[in-house]
Amino acid sequence: MTPSSQLQSQGFLYVAFGHKHTQEAIISVASLRKFNPDANIAVVTDQDIGSSEFNQIIRAAAPELSGTGNYHVKIEGLRRSPFERTIFLDTDTVVCGDLTDLFPLFDKFDILVTLNTWRVDRIFEEVCEPYSSVPKPFIACNTGVIGFAARPVVESLFAAWAERTRLQIVEHNETADQPSFRWAIYHSSARFAVLSSAHNYCAFNPGVLPAYQTLAVIHDRRPLMAWYAGVINKGTSKRPRVVGPFSLRLWVAYRVYSAAGKARSARARLLRLMDWK
């Protein structure tokens, strides 16, 4: 990590290697700046970036592993953060809310994570060692939004994550970084907090926005992300809201279940009235 004597207080970080991800970062940072106008924003990249939205551009070469191509470039970028307290965003995100209220959480926690509800790596994790040793109920994290403090316990976690990802590629030719992150955070002593889905809504999934919350980060690569987030954020609700695709079968089942509950309540009220008479 960056030496502590050179670190700034807090800020946001992108890691963008290659032209595609750099262009995505330029779009994402514009949305971040819209809702967080005074934010200190850095990007770790191997590209020339002309956007004035970034306060700092940290040039770096993408790490490579001979015979397998690029590996854990995100992790290496995270370890070059210039901040004591960092909120990292994937390049394929659109920010649609104020994120500065996340920074006080570092007074109590070392790492901020969001749930990975789309477990595409589940079978790999259950079959392959050492991932199968992690108990199934333990959370899986999406690495598209991560908050972290510049502390030794975090550096140890990132080092373990990077090495496990390297070995994973060598041993299994699997480049996904989320199985190795789940393994690393399980074996770490870092204090972590799980943020609500409002801070990393992967729009290809159904999601639940907690009551009285609006969407803060939408995470996808499809067009119209900002428009879709705006539609979701038209007002808040005193009840949780389900957003995204849903199952007709489960919707019908819920309606039957709900109707049965209402019928039972109506019967109980009727019996009470009869007793009163």
Image (spheres, helix red, strand yellow):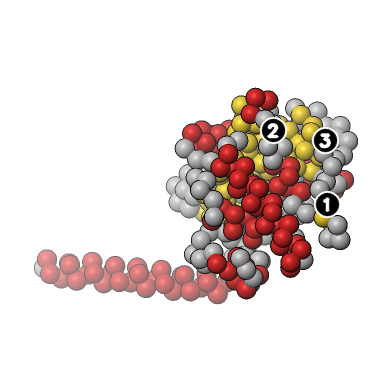
Residue ID for mark 3 = 59
Is residue 95 shown above or below 7? below
For badge 3, the amino acid type reads Arg
How packed mark 3 is, by other alpha carbons closer than 10 Å (few <14, some 14-19, many 20 or more), is some
Question: In the structure shown, which secondary structural element does the residue marked by tag 2 occupy?
Answer: loop
The label number, if any, that marks residue 64 in the structure image: 1
Image location (x, y in percent) of residue 19: 87, 45
How packed mark 1 is, by other alpha carbons closer than 10 Å (few <14, some 14-19, many 20 or more), is few
For badge 2, the amino acid type reads Thr
Residue ID for mark 2 = 2
Mark 1 or 3: in front is 1
Q: Splitting the image into 4 quarters, where does residue 40 fall?
A: top right
N-terminal-most mark, 2 or 1: 2
The label number, if any, that marks residue 248 in the structure image: none
Name the residue nearer the viewer: 189 or 212. 189
N-terminal-most mark, 1 or 3: 3
State the separation of the CA atoms marked 2 and 1.
21 Å
Indicate left or right for 63 with 263 as reference. Answer: right
